[in-house]
Amino acid sequence: MSKVTALADAVAKIPDGATLMIGGFMGVGSPHRVIDELVRQGKRDLTIIANDTARKGVDIGKLIDAGAVKRLVASHIGLNPETQKQMIAGQIAVELVPQGTLAERIRAGGTGLGGVLTATGVGTVVADGKPTVEIDGATFLVEKPLKADFALIAAWRADYYGNLQYQLTARNFNPAMAMAGATVIAEAHEIVPVGMIPPDSVETVGVIVDFLVAREG
Amino acid sequence: MSKVTALADAVAKIPDGATLMIGGFMGVGSPHRVIDELVRQGKRDLTIIANDTARKGVDIGKLIDAGAVKRLVASHIGLNPETQKQMIAGQIAVELVPQGTLAERIRAGGTGLGGVLTATGVGTVVADGKPTVEIDGATFLVEKPLKADFALIAAWRADYYGNLQYQLTARNFNPAMAMAGATVIAEAHEIVPVGMIPPDSVETVGVIVDFLVAREG
Amino acid sequence: MDEKTLIAKRVALELVDGNLVNLGIGLPTMVATFLPAGIKVFFQSENGLIGLQPLPEPGTASESLTDAGGSPVSFIPGAAAFDSVASFGFIRGGHLDVTVLGGLQVDEGGQLANWMVPGKMVPGMGGAMDLVTGAKKVIVAMTHTAKGAPKILKKCDLPLTSVRRVSLIVTEMAVIEPTAEGLVLRETAPGVTVAEVVAATQATLIIPDHVPEMAIA
Amino acid sequence: MDEKTLIAKRVALELVDGNLVNLGIGLPTMVATFLPAGIKVFFQSENGLIGLQPLPEPGTASESLTDAGGSPVSFIPGAAAFDSVASFGFIRGGHLDVTVLGGLQVDEGGQLANWMVPGKMVPGMGGAMDLVTGAKKVIVAMTHTAKGAPKILKKCDLPLTSVRRVSLIVTEMAVIEPTAEGLVLRETAPGVTVAEVVAATQATLIIPDHVPEMAIA
């Protein structure tokens, strides 16, 4: 039941036009090898859901540079001028989402909740066009769940079943995205025998991981 | 900044009539010593939010036996006939909540969400009197957040700052409840020096824990 | 073969290699014993474990590890532990492939009642409502009648567990599949005639031209 | 003392022993340098860490550990790492005692705009909307004017970060507290007169009889 798959084969399963969640925060904890392979295989018209687009030439920034992205859902693009340039030029449709709301919307998608009720964004431009509900006298936005065709995840350690452990701030959006992708491709620094990761240390359960990409060479 | 407090002193902070969340699942992962001390101090009129009331004479069952509980929010009371007896006699007002909804309502209370949108319970007696919302053609119940005056938590290992680790199925409702209690009292099997628990192994962060009860003797 | 063994063996044939499966307490738990050779499935216990297995030998129990009924269990290599919030995230989010539960009544709409008998038995729904609403496949494993009275009815008169149509009903007499058109008789038990199934069923059954016998060893 | 140092030193006086504090990128980050002696606070980085500290020496960076700006950092003993969902659970759930952020504009209602200049700078709100909406205390640390133009206005004309009234505004000229009655001038910087503050402020200020000088060393 090993989930280990060659990088090129795993990425080949992603069609043009797919919706991808990509873990990472300013490139920390992003699936570097999977991203490079997406660029190498020349994927087009992707919708990317991610916290940010890192910097120009770095991680998700490489997909932006390659013109592979037609739609982006993110909380922050301020450190990548190329993303802003393509947004202003109308090449990428960008939906900006408060970071905590983005995390909860992904979590809602992965855990079968109908949406997120949050005070964040109430009375701001983020609320435009969104329904609100009153609960015990307070107003909350109804934010919709997010799901993806593929979740592209980076872990520190994996076992062959696909159980994953993360490290420090390289964790960020990866665990929630692993739950919200119809197909999950995870890359890991290290793959260890099944049973090496104690049950209390497993952060993403292998049963939801479809393909595991080992470090090359 | 040690949070360690004598058992009797920590429990003395809980007034009669308080709302308590108590971790555990059929007694596994319940704060045994805190519960015994609640009984010893003769607390009355408590509202208890917990998955279940264990068995007669066991853990939360001791609070039921002592007649200390006037209201109970739980998912299952089937294995404690005393709870059912007091419910039928009108001594305890019982609100039965689906287990997953109970977990999410506690999580919502602890993380500032306005409520939970779930399909669980739609069209059943659980939906009686509750608002629903339609999202993309599907119907979801709006379930309210739960909070408590005190969360009573059991952990496997703690450090003196109150950082907590749990073990296997003794985890259950404890981490979510720790976030949803205005005051958090945690008991642990073992208290270790600060820095002994690596950052990636901390499951409940010490900054939200108020009192730490060590094992006696 | 007693009727419970027959039911458990037939249900076991529904499980597919790699499935994530939740077994209810009682009869459904027996299903694990009859897994076909070469089939490896992961059992979830909703109190916080994927990779549950029976205790391998006496004297190896841990107070931190039980199934959802509170009985000591063990785990396979590659198991993962998590809290109640995450546990029901798997269930509600559609990550659970199969749930096997007992039933009090199932009706022509395929709707299940299995959690209370008003005025008589009010144990609480525990995780049942989330499981029936969220699992990809819901299998009801129950005796065909109770004290001679049919349990498969035109309309449930007990409170429903979910409005969701269950996937399959397996009894000691038959395998019945609820569909949009109604209840279809898929198989009869060895030595049981179609007429006998119909006589023991209050609901109208759709009878295909050919109803095979259950293929159990 | 340059104006940024002055602001950072004054903000540092607002922190209380044991506080959980989030510092925005830029000027707010400097606050950590000026903590009063004997005060121990826990710094949160919204990308997933409580217990952040600066890198103690060159050559000890990890690619798995940065602050929310992507710069390498370290952690104190007793630190905890977690994912983005949990991180914003702390923020939204009211567990964060203080957030210190920069500002583009604050108005008489105490409402902050700090995330975009339409048509000019659209970096995205990142975590700012959640922080301003959810933290117990929101401190805006900013220069009093931008290129001579007041930033404390009758009404913000830039898009708001939150409708929530911030707790305190600290500039190189003054400390101003937004209240239900309006903006109250609490302190002036050394060598700055009340009249100078009023002249550099478009919003109406409520001036108490006695306005003390900032007590900074």
Image (cartoon, coloured by chain):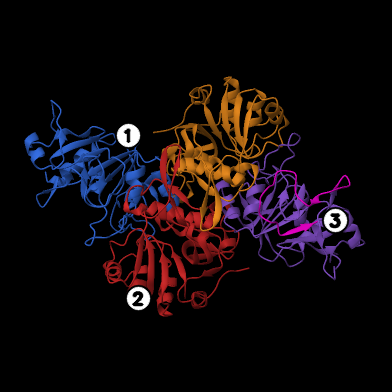
Chain colours: A orange, B red, C blue, D purple
The kind of residue on which mark 1 rests is Asp
**Main secondary structure of the magenta stretch:** loop
Disc 3 crowd, CA 10 A, few/some/many (<14, 14-19, 20+): many
Q: Quadrant of the C terminus of chain D?
A: bottom right
User: Mark 3 or mark 1, which is nearer to you?
Assistant: 3
Q: Chain of mark 1?
A: C
Q: Secondary structure at mark 1?
A: loop
Residue at 59% in and 19% down? A42
For label 3, the residue is D172
Nearer the observer, C94 or C60: C94
Outermost bottom residue: B41
Q: Quadrant of the N terminus of chain D?
A: bottom right
Residue C97 magenta: no
For label 1, the residue is C17
For label 2, the residue is B67
Nearer the observer, D65 or D97: D97
